[in-house]
Amino acid sequence: MRKLTKYAGVTLIELLVTMGILVLLVTILYAVFNVSLRGWQKADNMLQVTTAARVALGQMSKEIASAMIKTGSNSYYCVGFDKEDGSGWRTDSIGDEFYFIAPLKPANIEGGSDLCEVGYWLDGKGTSDTSDDTLTRFYVTDRRDEAGSLFDFNFSTPSGRSNSNEFVFNVTGLEFDFFDTNGDLFDNWDSRTAGGAPAKIKIRITVALGKGTSSTNPEFIRKEFSTVVSLPQ
């Protein structure tokens, strides 16, 4: 007579234990992957924030350092406004403002001199979402051959001769501090009444990237950057 061989099956308890172990392993792997992904995203956000600040401060420093400011001049002057005073020329600005004259006209623009009006202000886009805040650069070429001197920082200058463009995105703070030759600090500056150009200008910008806040979103980055520009006296 042939002997019957018994085959042991998998019990329900063994199956549940196996599935539980599998779910636990998948959960651990997902948690590790999620932490790694968030860490990578935060590092990438920090890189973008730092790059944006470097671009903004680099160009602003270069342009401000080339400003042509003459003592008592009504043509070659600079004006800086503190946002807390509400006295700026831009009604939609949510940060400080600074305007000056500099020889920065691009080579592809014909006519007039190399001088132009340049300025910086912070556009909040009229929203409460700080991710829309944008550092904006105001720019007007000098076309005296057409309509006389345009050194008036007039934002209503006809199209084609003015350009207030978005410069750097995600900038949520813009501040200018002005120092005289004695090292005294001023929030506002007008070279026409202050006796000429400030000796130094400290530029501070705050760049933020990511939704929410640092307490609600680990990927959120907000960092302040600053630099000091010396002006010829």
Image (tube, grey):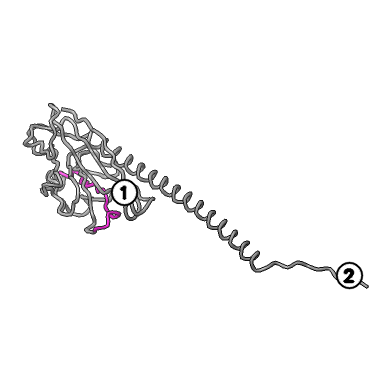
In magenta stretch: residue 110? no
Q: Earlier in the sequence, mark 1 or mark 2?
A: 2
Real-space Cα distance between discs 1 and 2? 78 Å
Amino acid type at circle 2 is: Lys
Q: Secondary structure at mark 2?
A: loop
- Comparing 13 with 152, the one in front is 13
In the image, taking residue 51 as reference, residue 101 lies left or right, namely left
Amino acid type at circle 1 is: Ala
Q: Is residue 23 above or below residue 114?
A: below
- Comparing 173 with 159, the one in front is 173
Name the residue that disc number 1 marks. 208
Residue 181 appears at what percent x and percent y? 13, 27
Name the residue that disc number 2 marks. 3
Q: Quadrant location of the N terminus?
A: bottom right
Residue 209 appears at what percent x and percent y? 34, 50
- Comparing 110 with 59, the one in front is 59
On residue 62, the disc is: none
Question: Residue 125's image quarter?
Answer: bottom left
Residue 43 appears at what percent x and percent y? 42, 45
Q: Secondary structure at mark 1?
A: strand
Q: Quadrant location of the C terminus?
A: top left
Residue 153 appears at what percent x and percent y? 14, 46
- Segment colored magenta: 128-144
Q: What residue is rendered at 26% in x and 35% in y?
A: 227
